[in-house]
Amino acid sequence: MLAKRLFTFSVVVATMALAACGNVDQFTANNTLDSESGQVSLRDQSVHSALDTNEEWESTLPTQKATVGDPEDFPAPASAEAEPDATPSHGTINEEQVALDRPAAKDVVGSAKLKPTVYYFPIFDTEKTTCPDSQKVTLYGQGGKTIIRVCKKISDACGLQGSCSIKKNGKIRLLNILARIKGQNRYFEIDREECKYGYGVRTVCLDPFHTLAADLTIYKIGEVIYVPSVIGLILPDGTMHDGYFIIRDKGSGIMGRGRFDFYSGFMPWYDKTNPFNKIGLADKNTEVPYMRITGSKAKEIQVRRNYPSIPKDNQPLK
């Protein structure tokens, strides 16, 4: 069992530009099966101004079980069967280390609180997820060409998450939504060497645990978002999170300022071992501060994550 570690640190924030862009945040859960939604006023988000130079931001997040979907609708890999303690695991990072990587005031264009959900790359084995032929639907490619027929449950999950891996007769096919034409999703097969975790917008690769989907009427593809509460979070590959994310994707249910969907690669959002789940990012009731980053720091993070591709040392597809 991993112990919860708390750490706090001071944050210098530039004059708010977000407040001038609107006074409400629309929150519509991406993975939820209910119809709950609401609006959160920026007045209630404790927006920080340049005068808040001595404020401390608590790094701890709620540790609640994900409540944004129905696990049986999204078959999970074997690793999701484990049910360890849901205590978050943050590595020990001292204030000096945090300060070295903290954005300068000139690189911060605004701050508020975000509403999260988590999405992932579903993995399906048609030999294990079976159904009668009468209950199967067709996944179509460019020009309406038939790619594969699968159970409706698989089709629904692929459409909701935007991409999926389907194993049939020993062959694995990685599919990503190309477009939606007349109410029908059209897919293309993913280049496993170039973007092994799927594509976001256009040819931008999804980078597990460092990618956000956002409302592109408010944010831009490639924009860097800083979430201090995530700093030090232990990721599946053993590395510690630096708190920075890049917007690489959009979602049909991701609408409004401060509404982000966090991408966790092949690890389902409901998996108790998912680091994002452990710290409450899969819980629609979570609210944590974030900052929009620009300038030299944004460019530094894009280079760090090899945007629009993914880092060369990223874990290979298995």
Image: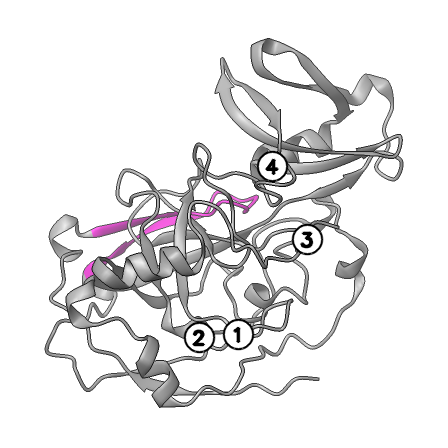
The x, y position of residue 227, in whole percent, is: 37, 67
Which picture quadrant has residue 107? bottom left
**Is there CB contact under 8 Å for labels 2 and 4?**
no
Q: Is residue 265 magenta?
A: no
Which picture quadrant has residue 297? bottom left
The answer to which of marks 2 and 3 sits earlier in the sequence is 2
Please identify, in this view, whether the residue under mark 1 or under mark 3 is nearer the observer.
3
The answer to which of marks 1 and 3 sits earlier in the sequence is 1
The x, y position of residue 243, in whole percent, is: 41, 69
Q: CA distance from mark 2 to mark 4?
A: 28 Å
The answer to which of marks 1 and 4 sits earlier in the sequence is 4
**Is there CB contact under 8 Å for labels 1 and 4?**
no
**Is there CB contact under 8 Å for labels 1 and 2?**
yes
The x, y position of residue 1, in whole percent, is: 71, 84
Amino acid under disc 4: Ser
Amino acid under disc 2: Ile
The circle on residue 231 is 2
Q: Which residue matches tag 3?
A: 316
Please identify, in this view, whether the residue under mark 4 or under mark 3 is nearer the observer.
3
Q: Secondary structure at mark 4?
A: strand
Q: Which residue matches tag 4?
A: 163
The answer to which of marks 4 and 3 sits earlier in the sequence is 4
Q: Secondary structure at mark 1?
A: loop
